[in-house]
Image: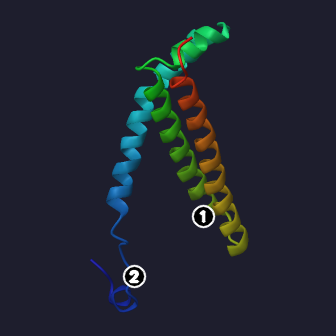
Amino acid sequence: MRTPLARVLGLGSARSGTEDFFADRVRAVVLTLLTPYMIGLGVYLFGRPRAVVMDTLSRIWVAPAVMVFVIISLLHMRLGMQVIIEDYIHHKGWKLTLIFANWAFTIAAGSALIFALLMIALRPVA
């Protein structure tokens, strides 16, 4: 139901709210399931020798889970920071700069983390 003014101005739904809402919930469920696993993995690896850490992170059931956790966590972080920037920064120049910096940081951190995980997971066995 739209007001006559909204119809004239063309204001209304952007038609993507449901998909965004559903995607947010799916990411939250995946993070909720993976977080205890990552905490347990961190506790297990804490203080272990480097060889044990490298061997554990290169296992077939660990490396993909860590990679999915990293990707979804970074996406979740970027979207959360973007909402904060859009809500609280009112100067257009600063808003654009901070949104770009948010994207750049996410891409840089994600690239470095994924590269490191791939180097560990695909390393030759000695």
Quadrant position of the N terminus in the picture: bottom left
Instruction: Report whether 42 appears left or right of 2.
Output: right
Is the Cβ of the residue at disc 2 closer than 8 Å to that at disc 1? no
Helix, strand or loop under label 2: loop
Spot occupied by residue 60 in the image (x, y as percentages of width and height): 41, 20
Tag of residue 11: 2
Identity of the residue drawn at 46% across and 17% down? 59
Q: Which quarter of the figure has residue 25?
A: top left
Q: Position of residue 61 (x, y in %)?
A: 40, 20
Packing grade of label 2 (10 A; few <14, some 14-19, many >=20) is few
Residue 31 image point, x, y percent: 45, 34
| Picture layout, residue 28 above or below residue 4 | above
To which residue does mark 1 refer?
86
Would you place residue 55 above or below residue 107 in this image? above
Q: Residues within 10 Å of mark 1 (few under 14, many from 20)?
A: some
Horizontal side, residue 102 vs residue 10: left or right: right
Question: Which quadrant would the C terminus be assigned to in this image?
Answer: top right
Query: Which one is earlier in the sequence, the residue at label 2 or at label 1?
Result: 2
In the foreground, 17 or 53 = 53
In the image, what residue type sits under mark 2? Leu
Looking at the picture, tell me which residue is in the foreground, 122 or 1. 122
Figure check: 89 above or below 116: below
Name the side, left or right, on which 78 lies relative to 24. Answer: right
Q: Residue furthest left?
A: 1
Residue 123 falls in image quadrant = top right
- Give the spatial CA distance, label 2 vs label 1: 19 Å
Name the residue at 66% across, 12% down.
50
Residue at (61% x, 48% y) in the render: 106
